[in-house]
Image: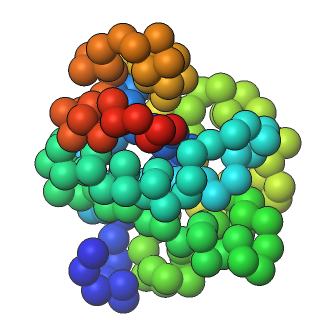
Amino acid sequence: MNNQHEQKHIAVFGSAFNPPSLGHLSVIKRLSHFDTVLLVPSVVHAWGKKMADFDKRCDWVNEFITDVNISNAFLCADERDISKNTLVTTWILLSHLQNQYPCSLLTFVIGPDNFLNFMKFYKAKEIIKKWSILTCPETVKVRSTHIRDALQRGEDISSLTTPRLVITLEKKDCL
């Protein structure tokens, strides 16, 4: 990414990315009007779901970005460092990113399911006052769960994620 002191419009798209799916891609494509889209894998799932190793999911996000060739999308693995000192909440993440990009305008991208529960988020009212929130549902109804389930059944996943990830994910013990 370019100079952190340059004013940019940055979309912050957090997800488990366990693994990235074509549903994720349908959201990212709709964020093309942002200068930068940060794809932020969560270190710990908000509802305690088991996830693949964080570094592995970061590698998947990088492969995914390479496959989709969207020039404004970047991996942001900052939750790894933040989580060493505290539980990572949306407030903590956005505050951290605002410190990283002090001149930029941040927009937190959220799915409609999470938006319905947004007021339960830690410091939800403060988040709304300080940053923009964009509800952006998937237009392709493919979720990471579909990929994991298909892999367990030995089914083809080429219609669920990108080509590099298909190859990576079909290897034994990837999830």
Color style of the picture: rainbow
* Picture residue at 47% right of the left edge, 11% below the top: 153
Picture quadrant of residue 68: top left
* Above or below for 158 versus 12: above
Q: Nearer the viewer, residue 13 or 168?
A: 168
> Residue at 59% of width from left, 61% of height from top?
131
Query: Can the viewer see residue 67 in this picture?
Result: yes
- Frontmost residue, 29 versus 131: 29
Residue at 56% across, 53% down: 53
Q: Residue at x 27, y 31 (%)?
A: 166
Whether residue 143 is visible here, answered yes or no, is: no
In the rendering, at what x and y percent does residue 100 appear? 49, 83
The image shows a total of numbered marks equal to: 0
User: Residue 78 placed where, x, y %?
Assistant: 53, 71
Q: Eyeballing the image, is 40 above or below 164?
A: below
Position of residue 68 relative to residue 83, above or below, is: above
Residue 27, how many percent across, how many down? 38, 34
Quarter of the image for residue 120 reads top right
